Image (cartoon, grey):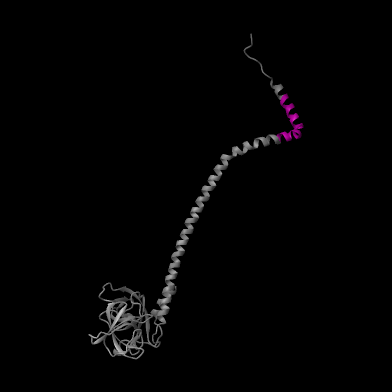
Amino acid sequence: MKPIFVRGISNQFRLTLAVVMSVILLVANDRLEPARQSLASLLSPLQYLANVPGELLDWSAQSLATRDMLEQQNKELLRQQLLMSERLQRFEHLRQENQRLRELLGSPVHMDSRKMVAEVMEVASDPFHHYVVINHGSRNGVFVGQPVVDAQGVVGQVVQVSELTARVLLLSDPKHGLPVRITRNDVRLIANGIGELDEIELRHVAKSTDIKVGDLLVTSGLGNRFPEGYPVARVISVSRDDGQSYLKVTAQPLAALDRIRYLLLIWPEDHPGAKPESLEPAAIDANSGAES
């Protein structure tokens, strides 16, 4: 009969065996190096395979971080692009305004007369009345009947003045009449508005009048309202009808009445408010604002 409790290897024997094996391994360490390298070579694929999940996690995290960073950079670059585009548009607008002001100040105005740049604040919405409201009034010396021009020619005249604003009646308004003369032969006529921004009419022109398409019309100075010599319009049509007593003559205003922004107020030399200054302070401020 086998005993119930079997006695195993003693602890003393185990210790002796461990010491002997340790000594043998220490002595044979150099000789076991090739075997160790061969074993490591055999196990290296397993090590790479074991590292694959960690590498995948690191790559995924880096890719996500890189993608987030690229998205943030893309948003920031887009924001900067929009800001720069808006600034470029503002600069282009200021450049165009500055160019218009320079053209306006270089218009054919008598250098010994007072002048002032004004900006259009309102345009009449009534198709039967052509006028604009400007940002200068009696405080700046604006008066009823004052001539108004732009960089190309005559625009109209002031018909109503308040403390800070004034209303300018355009020469295309049916109620506006302007004495003009043909530069080619000094024939004097009256130019009347007909309610069209790009067309005016010369009425009561005798059939014997020497007038041709392309003739330049300038202010004649009659009536002491507009100084002489300011460009007004150019003749575009001359019609002779045997059944009519007068010629039918139409002309196109030189001023861009449909897109005016800045106007030039001028003071005739004989007006009490006229000063021998080339430019009023208000005009300088307007020009500086366009250049800033």
Query: Could you say which quadrant of the image residue 155 lies in?
Result: bottom left
Count the marks: how many?
Answer: 0
Nearer-the-camera pick, 271 or 191 = 191
Residue 289 at least partly seen: no
Query: Among all residues in the image, which is located at the extreme front?
Result: 242
Nearer-the-camera pick, 203 or 55 = 203
- Residue at 51% x, 50% y is 67
Query: Could you say which quadrant of the image residue 161 lies in?
Result: bottom left
Any magenta on residue 137? Answer: no
Nearer-the-camera pick, 171 or 237 = 237
Which residues, given as a range, are shown in magenta?
16-36
Q: Quadrant of the C terminus?
A: bottom left
Q: In this view, does 59 lie to the left or right of 242?
A: right
- Residue at 43% x, 76% y is 99
Report the predominant secondary structure element of the magenta stretch.
Answer: helix
Q: Image height check: is 52 above or below 95?
A: above
Q: In this view, does 71 lie to the left or right of 190?
A: right
Q: In the image, residue 175 lies at what x, y percent?
A: 25, 81
Q: Is residue 55 left or right of residue 87?
A: right
Q: Is residue 118 left or right of residue 68?
A: left
Q: In which quarter of the image is the N terminus?
A: top right
Nearer-the-camera pick, 183 or 44 = 183
Query: Among all residues in the image, which is located at the extreme right?
Result: 27
Q: In the image, residue 290 lies at what x, y percent?
A: 42, 74
Q: In the image, residue 69 lies at what x, y percent?
A: 51, 52
Q: In the image, residue 242 lies at what x, y percent?
A: 24, 86
Residue 77 at least partly seen: yes
- Residue at 45% x, 67% y is 88
